[in-house]
Amino acid sequence: MKNISRRGLMLHGAAAAVSLFLFIAIVPFNSFAHTKDESIYLSGAWIKDEVGWRFFNQWNSAYPAGKWAEYQSHSYYFMDNGYMATSWRFINDNWYYFNPNQGKEEGAMVTGWVYDSDLCGWFYTNQIGIMVTGWHKIDGFWYYFNPKSNGLLGLMAVNQFVDGSYVDANGRMNEVR
């Protein structure tokens, strides 16, 4: 019996050491979170490791996966592997953009204008976070966003004619539509 106890202590000690090594940050919080299916109360901690952020729910000892959550007026999405989404993600047949920058709003779904430094261009997500395509009137101006899945889906057109209308360097159509 003594030998089994020692092994148990050794395993627990090893697990604690691995946990200490892997977890860079643990931020506890309690919050109501709304998923697409239900409203749940989360109590636990945000955990960051070398892959990204996850939320450990103390009530069921699990990470939410494939779920939306609302926290402090921001929408977050937890991917199937339990990690919080960042950058562009294709979810339920729509593209969403999640803040990739470290800080208070890391992982928060973005609504409105999104600048892509790799493509040196602008995208727009509507009030529920979905990337728009085609013609859209935003703040009184018409803009055109690429509707083709050619690697530039949703990119705002600039300095060109689209459907017989010219869009300027700011992406605004120069005629009344």
Image: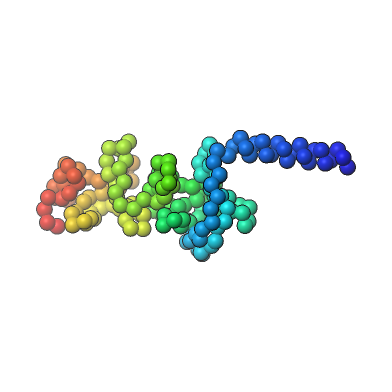
Q: Nearer the viewer, residue 121 or 146?
A: 121
| Residue 162 coordinates in the image, percent (x, y) | 18, 48
Residue at point 15%, 50% (across, down): 173
Q: Locate residue 170 relative to residue 91 in the image: left or right.
A: left
Colouring method of the image: rainbow
Image: 37 above or below 113: below
Let me know if residue 92 appears in the view.
no
Q: Nearer the viewer, residue 128 or 106?
A: 106
Residue at point 73%, 40% (across, down): 12
Quadrant containing the C terminus in the rendered view: bottom left
Residue farthest left in this picture = 175
Quadrant containing the N terminus in the rendered view: top right
Q: Locate residue 164 relative to residue 78 in the image: left or right.
A: left
Residue at point 63%, 56% (across, down): 60
Which of the 4 image quarters holds residue 6?
top right
Q: Nearer the viewer, residue 5 or 112?
A: 5
Which of the 4 image quarters holds residue 49?
top right
| Residue 68 coordinates in the image, percent (x, y) | 47, 56
Residue farthest right in this picture = 1
| Residue 52 coordinates in the image, percent (x, y) | 50, 41
Residue at point 31%, 46% (across, down): 114
Image: 79 above or below 59: above
Let me know if residue 141 appears in the view.
yes
User: How many marks overall?
Assistant: 0
| Residue 133 coordinates in the image, percent (x, y) | 28, 52
Q: Locate residue 131 relative to residue 41 in the image: left or right.
A: left
Which of the 4 image quarters holds residue 150?
top left
